[in-house]
């Protein structure tokens, strides 16, 4: 059933754990009451996202435990994310409830998705513990859900306008605008647009030592060929039904960027450039029929055009264009068998095609069918969810026989609340994941490996969480959750940059055993009236070892780029209209190749970011000004070997709401 909540100048703890005390205008919220989540999630709300020194969704994901970000540096650098050492392709990323796809290389460049219109980012390990979701969502080892802002109007207003501008280091200039319009009592629209440009130039230090410890290169220089211009536009229609809702979205992104490439032997000039023209349309419809049956339908069409050029005379000259198409249809259905027992049946059909102007290109097509059967048992102090997903994939390539593969992946989750107030929960899950090699893995003309095996993983997780709110006193909110996990990955596929950032070399590692512990803690403190202090701390320990062949020199070594220790911290102090935010990210020692030897060793790195903002009103306009200093201590570091990150840099943001 649907319930209606009315908020009017109250102290609220529900909107965000980071902004536990807020004064909000009167609003009416209509939503289905749902308390059936089995596995707790990690969430960053819109208010906290605004305070972070983050340009894109990728930057925000650095603050989630269990995730590792691959960042090639600068505003325009490609950014992908890896979950619990299992790889980018095991992480599903959904944008307003519909999965983002990339059959070409399986890696979603999260730098293409701005935070300016994002209301919430949520991470689920295992899978989202909901029955009403697309069938393919049951197959991921983890999932990130990006939810954009839904129009909200104060009484007597039919529109909202927001303009935001930012200027920063590396000649960064970004301008975005949002217009929301109420079309009727049940239909509203929003239009968001953003333009970004940057020279991509920043100072860095390049220091390399020989195996005997003597200095081979020690240079301070300016990063070149990292320029970018980008334009994003997004239009939405939101509609309410008597027992449901519908949404329609059109999204387009266009960019040109230089690819500075890896610095090798003190040489850093590159002639690589990339153009992206990505567009998709998607629709989502959900409705409840009676008190027991709920259904959802999702449809999407995406067209991605990528041009890659390499004019470096020291390498092979390349000028190639890739055209990728995707068509998705999904239906999900949930039926309540008993008040405490529900079941669901979901089916997805996905079609992908990749064309290129390369000679002898395979022009692959892929038909993917997903059929998921799931059930959930929900009592006051015990919850259980189980699912079984069938994945059937058929590939067709030019001049070759079709290949078909079918896999079954089960999962089971449970959560127990020992105490009546449900402040403590104990949870566990076991799950099998499966993913096919991407088109680039299999069919790329120069580096594709047609002999690659599909990759599968087994996941085991136990954890607990504790949440407590206090109505008075210094401590108002406390949250602690920790998880211990063990994953085994069979025929793990690993991609390494091959001199050029757009190109990869593919191989199966065989078998990897992953052990880890994630810890997350949050606290909200109110020392005096109008002063609010919030803190968030995350820590991850991971041991990801290659156990393929005892005869290998790297047997039981940590796999590349996975640190044993990593973590982040966020501290926010809010006094009246002022906000001071400090964020810290740490990545421990790791290795950049399979062999854990001194020559491949990478030192730990950390960054500290500061931001100060103030809100004020002038003639009814709401202003917010923010000054940020990133990498305060000007740390020299590489996330990926030979791709230096920016030293200390600055930004100034002006946000206006009309």
Image (cartoon, rainbow, N blue to C red):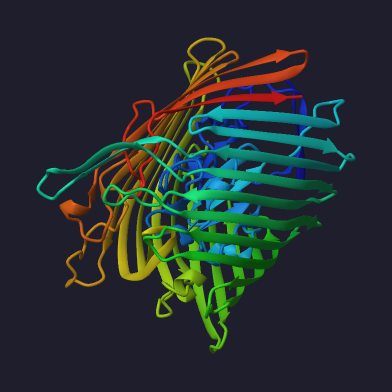
Percent across and percent down for residue 542 are: 31, 50
Q: Nearer the viewer, residue 140 or 113?
A: 113
Left or right of residue 477, residue 558 in this image? left
Residue placed furthest toward the left: 212
Residue 357 quadrant? bottom right
Q: Is residue 438 visible?
A: no
Query: Among all residues in the image, which is located at the extreme top?
Result: 528
Please give the name of the residue rendered at 54% of the width and 89% of the height, measured from the top-left corner: 401
Q: Residue furthest right?
A: 184
Residue 244, placed above or below residue 527? below
Residue nearest the viewer, comparing 658 with 491: 658
Left or right, residue 464 beside residue 332:
left
- Residue 625 in sight: yes
Q: Quadrant of the C terminus?
A: top right
Q: Nearer the viewer, residue 576 or 428?
A: 576
Would residue 458 appear left or right of 25 to someone viewing this image? left
Whether residue 374 is situated above or below residue 558 in the rendered picture: below
Residue 593: x percent and y percent? 26, 58
Image point (70%, 63%), residue name: 301
Q: Quadrant of residue 321?
A: bottom right
Q: Position of residue 500 (x, y in %)?
A: 41, 58
| Point 89% across, 39% down: residue | 185
- Give the x, y percent position of residue 191: 76, 41
């Amino acid at each position: 059933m649907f319930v209606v909540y009315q908020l009017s100048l109250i102290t609220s703890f529900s909107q965000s754990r980071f902004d536990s005390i807020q004064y909000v205008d009167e609003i009416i919220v209509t939503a289905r009451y749902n308390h059936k989540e089995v596995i707790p999630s990690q969430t960053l709300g819109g208010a906290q996202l605004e305070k972070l020194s983050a340009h894109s969704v990728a930057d925000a994901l650095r603050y989630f435990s269990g995730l590792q970000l691959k960042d090639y540096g600068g505003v325009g650098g490609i950014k992908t994310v890896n979950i619990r050492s299992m790889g980018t392709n095991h992480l599903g990323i959904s944008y307003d409830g519909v999965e983002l796809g990339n059959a070409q290389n399986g890696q979603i460049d999260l730098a293409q998705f701005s935070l300016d219109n994002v209301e919430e980012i949520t991470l689920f390990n295992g899978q989202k513990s909901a029955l009403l979701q697309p069938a393919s969502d049951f197959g991921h080892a983890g999932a990130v859900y990006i939810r954009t802002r839904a129009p909200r109007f104060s009484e007597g207003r039919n529109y909202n306008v927001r303009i935001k501008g930012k200027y920063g280091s590396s000649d960064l200039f970004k301008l975005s605008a949002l217009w929301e319009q109420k079309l009727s009592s049940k239909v509203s629209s929003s239009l968001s647009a953003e333009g970004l440009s940057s020279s991509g130039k920043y100072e860095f230090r390049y220091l390399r030592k020989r195996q005997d410890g003597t200095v081979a290169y020690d240079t301070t220089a300016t990063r070149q060929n990292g320029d970018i211009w980008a334009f994003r536009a997004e239009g939405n229609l939101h509609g309410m039904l008597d027992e449901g809702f519908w949404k329609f979205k059109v999204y387009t992104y266009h960019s040109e960027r230089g690819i500075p490439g890896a610095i090798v032997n003190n040489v850093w000039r590159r002639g690589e450039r990339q153009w992206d023209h990505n567009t998709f349309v998607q629709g989502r419809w959900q409705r409840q029929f009676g008190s027991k049956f709920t259904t959802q339908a999702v449809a999407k069409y995406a067209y991605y055009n990528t041009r890659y050029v390499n004019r470096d005379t020291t390498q092979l000259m390349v000028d190639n264009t890739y055209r990728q198409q995707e068509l998705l249809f999904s239906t999900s259905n949930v039926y309540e068998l008993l008040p405490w027992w529900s079941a669901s049946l979901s089916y997805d059909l996905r079609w992908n095609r990749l064309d290129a102007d390369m000679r002898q290109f395979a022009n692959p097509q892929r038909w993917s069918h997903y059929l998921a059967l799931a059930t959930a048992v929900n009592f006051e102090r015990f919850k259980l969810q189980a699912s079984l997903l069938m994945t059937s994939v058929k590939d067709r390539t030019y001049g070759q026989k079709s290949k078909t593969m079918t896999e079954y992946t089960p999962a089971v989750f449970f959560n127990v609340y020992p105490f009546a107030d449900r402040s403590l929960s104990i949870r566990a899950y076991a799950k099998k994941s499966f993913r096919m090699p991407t088109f680039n893995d299999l069919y790329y003309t120069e580096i594709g490996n047609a002999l690659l095996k599909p990759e599968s993983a087994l996941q085991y997780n136990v954890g607990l969480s504790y949440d407590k709110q206090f109505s008075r006193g210094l401590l108002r909110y406390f949250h602690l959750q920790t998880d211990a996990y063990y994953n085994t990955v069979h025929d793990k596929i690993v991609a390494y940059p091959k001199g050029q950032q757009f190109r990869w070399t593919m191989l199966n590692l065989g078998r990897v055993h992953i052990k880890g512990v994630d810890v997350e803690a949050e606290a909200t403190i109110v020392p005096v009236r109008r002063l609010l202090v919030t803190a968030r701390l995350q820590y991850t320990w991971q041991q990801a070892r290659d156990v393929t062949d005892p005869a290998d020199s790297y047997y039981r070594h940590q796999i590349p780029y996975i640190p044993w220790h990593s973590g982040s911290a966020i501290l926010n102090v809010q006094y009246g209209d002022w906000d001071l935010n400090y964020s810290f990210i740490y990545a421990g020692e790791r290795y950049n190749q399979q062999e854990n030897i001194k020559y491949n060793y990478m030192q730990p790195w950390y960054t500290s970011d500061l931001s100060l903002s103030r809100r004020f009103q002038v003639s009814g306009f709401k202003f917010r000004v923010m000054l940020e200093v990133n990498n305060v201590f000007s740390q020299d570091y590489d996330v990926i070997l030979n791709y230096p990150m920016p030293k200390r840099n600055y930004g100034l943001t002006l946000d206006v709401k009309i």
